[in-house]
Amino acid sequence: MTTSNVESPLDVAQIRADFPILHQVDDEQHPLVYLDNGASSQRPKSVIDCLSDVYAKHYANVHRGAHRLSGESTDLFEVARRAVRQFIGAASENEVIFTSGTTMGINLVARSWGDSNLKKGDEILLTEMEHHSNLVPWHQLAERTGATIRAIPITKDGQLDLDFLPKLLTERTKLVAVTAVSNVLGTINPVGQIITAAHAAGAKVLVDAAQAVPHEAIDVGLWDADFVAFSGHKMLGPSGVGVLYGKEILLDEMPPFLGGGSMIDMVEIDRFTPAMLPAKFEAGTPPIADAIAMTPAIEYLEEVGLERILQHEQSLAAYAHELLSDVKGLRILGPEVTAKAGIVSFVVDGLAASDVATFLDGRGVAVREGHHCTLPLHKKLGISASVRASFYLYNTREEVEKLSDAVHAAVEFFG
Ligand code: PMP
């Protein structure tokens, strides 16, 4: 039996009933087939209701007012921080910084930790499958400090070639920045193994967990990661909020990234002293309602069960591999289904990815096309763009069939 025949462990019909946006049709009555979850997931009613409830009943600025509403919103904001702490296995709430998303979290580390710890001759080790968010902040850091960028190459089947690790990890390596799951190939990287090797070489590790946290139970303590960044909007939560996890001992030593209200202990006309954690890294008014709505998002994921979610997505990916395998000239990027999350990116000989995606959209199938913010990866693969279908807990086998039917039709139409 192939993985694609394995029955989903989820009651998908019941899950879909919780997601109002999924029940729409386009002008030609095609039901929405939402397969762009790698870019952003949709939200269950509990998250949408929470947002409206906060604004209708509890909203005020946090950590400021002496009044009742500010107390209520502050309590809810800190409840969300506790929910995140428990969700990712952090040791303390001081290690959970609310950001605007993965990009902001990585920039925070590059500016604050990077500027204080790197110098000319030091090396930053990345991988060839990183998202621009986990590349450009390090390029900018290298420009500021004179550090050098190196990268772990990928194998032909889209996995990290860890045979290179002993050669690439040296006493010059100060930081390893690696994605836990590739947003294009779907590859699930052996983060724990990389962290152990990096620590043995004396380097710190930042994990880009944007594509991991929505689909697999992570434990930052088990990983022993130094920094982990992820976004709310890919894990059933609101856009505009994300999380940076950092080991308290590191965050304590780091200077603030942004300056402003809330992040200070004391300010005089010509100096300031920063606040304690986590406020030190939360300058200005945070995304209040968005952070609060992380609580129902986490509750939803935990109730369904992340292990079961990943299993479900992998069975859909396996089914997609099977159905797309007979499309003439179609090549799926990345490893075998067993080594990846529910992401199926592909190219079709002679067809522009944008044409395929537009054709699919005409049948209600929402996918992403382009370089998916991974230009170096696409260059390595010798392509300029690809089509990406990315699955989540509410997608069905019928939707995979619609994807496949639409791709077959696109190839016939353009071919
Ligand atoms: N890293 C990866 C692997 C991603 O997939 C994304 C989002 N596409 C990001 C970083 C950036 O996330 P955000 O835009 O939410 O900051």
Image: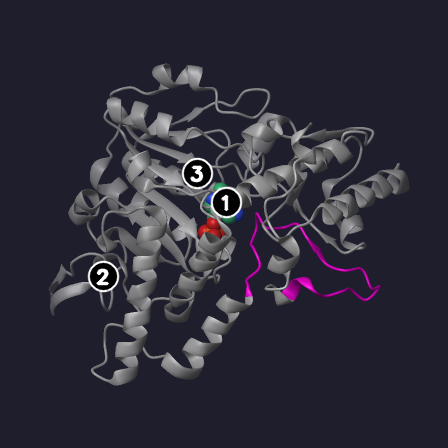
Looking at the rendered structure, the secondary structure element under dot 1 is loop
User: Ligand 1 closer than 8 Å to the CB at disc 2?
Assistant: no
Which residue does the image show at 72% across and 66% down from the upper left?
24
Which residue does the image show at 28% across and 36% down from the upper left?
145
Coordinates of residue 75 in the picture (x, y in percent): 28, 71
Reading the image, the residue beneath label 1 is 215
* Residue 27 as seen in the image, left or right of residue 331: right
Q: Nearer the viewer, residue 398 or 402?
A: 398
Q: Nearer the viewer, residue 13 or 72?
A: 13
* Residue 387 as seen in the image, left or right of residue 226: right
Reading the image, the residue beneath label 3 is 135
Reading the image, the residue beneath label 2 is 279
Q: Amino acid at mark 1?
A: His
- Image quadrant holding the C terminus, namely top right
Q: Is residue 36 magenta?
A: yes
What segment is highlighted magenta in the picture?
A: 21-44
Q: Nearer the viewer, mark 2 or mark 1?
A: 1
